Amino acid sequence: MKTKVLSTSDEDLDIAAEIIRSGGLVAFPTETVYGLGADALNPEAVRKIYQVKGRPADNPSIVHISQIEELKGLCLEITEDIRTLAAVFWPGPMTMIVKRDPKIPDVTTGGLDTVGIRMPRGKGASELIRRSGLPIAAPSANISGKPSPTEAQHVLDDFDGRIEAVIDDGPCDVGIESTVIDMTGASPMILRPGFLTKRDFEEALGKPVLLDPTLNQRPDPSRDDFHPKAPGQKYKHYAPDAEMILFDGDPENVRKAILAEQKRREEAGQKVRVLFFDEAHEREAARYFFADLRKADRDGIEVILASALPEEGLGFSVMNRMLKSSGFHIIHV
Ligand code: TXA
Ligand code: MG
């Protein structure tokens, strides 16, 4: 199969929508990361996503819509809080977990009785959904376990020749995946941190929002007590080929420790990449982190040394990815 590289022109979006309608796979840009899309209501089409990604079947896919009204046909119970969050944050980097309408097939939801719904921002995504006339199931468009794709080239690196098309609309603005918030419990609960934070939701709802307690846990492989509520959060994630080490502490100590480690490693003949992140540039850290990991792999880097961010607000969300990428290898200096 030859993977078509499409633009966001009307003509190309019609081609992409026709591929979705006929059960094929199209990778498309969103404001967060590129998604690998298929007709969410067609089990055969969704099954293909899992095959090409190598994704475990129990990990549900987010269903993408282009109009808030489409929630009605996909969700059994639209509460006042769901309505409020949709009105305030959509289109945008928020996925709400809601009670699923039985018409959504089991493959799409990993057999759960809930479904994650998101209305993404950007022409490539919203026009693809609108023109196909279907809700689109889409996980991030990367091979399972690899860093999420923030450019069309990243999608091609993983799937060239294995999917029908990718819509190229340049680099993603946010750079980390949407915040996943579970709206099915007594209080809303964040299952995956993202660009929108606990405080954003609390301000919009005027009530406390919980965090899945596993988000503050460092998994210990010798114990079986890591059970995040979003199935995807338990799998190995965002891993570069290189070994990755995070350094945390006073910024000046961190800088010195990284440079000393870099020297040691280079003297031992290893190819090292240093990634300095700082609190004043969290937005950029989010936007470029996955691209930096993919670039390191392309350059044959063996060791990545990175400074940690303070785990608050957006920094908490970026650190969620950085910790996983490093296999929770963090040194306090
Ligand atoms: O920004 C994003 O969310 C991107 C773009 C393409 O929209 N998508 C994305 O999808 O990151 P994915 O499949 O890579 O991550 C979805 C996460 C997984 O951790 C999954 O387990 C969780 O959301 N999830 C999906 N449906 C769920 C449900 N019904 N209950 C709990 N967690 C769910
Ligand atoms: Mg993913």
Image (spheres, grey):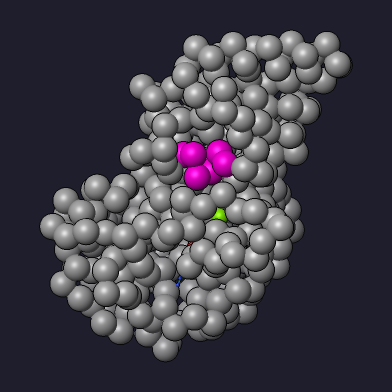
How far across and how far down the image is residue 119, in percent?
33, 60
How far across and how far down the image is residue 94, in percent?
34, 56
* Image point (41%, 68%), residue name: 116
Residue 320 on the magenta segment: yes
Magenta: predominant secondary structure element?
helix
Residue 239 on the magenta segment: no
Quarter of the image containing the N terminus?
A: bottom right
Number of marks in picture? 0
How far across and how far down the image is residue 178, in percent?
41, 52
* Image point (68%, 21%), residue name: 273
Indicate the quadrant of ligand 2 in the picture. Answer: bottom right
Q: Is residue 240 above or below residue 41?
A: above
Say which quarter of the image contains residue 323: top right
Q: Nearer the viewer, residue 214 or 106?
A: 214
* Image point (43%, 87%), residue name: 103
Residue furthest to the bottom in view is: 102
Left or right: residue 118 versus residue 170 is: left
Residue 297 seen anywhere in this rendered image of the structure: yes
* Image point (71%, 63%), residue name: 54
Say which quarter of the image contains residue 135: bottom left
Quarter of the image containing the C terminus?
A: top right
Left or right: residue 67 versus residue 278 is: left
Magenta range: 318-323
Residue 3 seen anywhere in this rendered image of the structure: no
How far across and how far down the image is residue 281, in percent?
39, 24
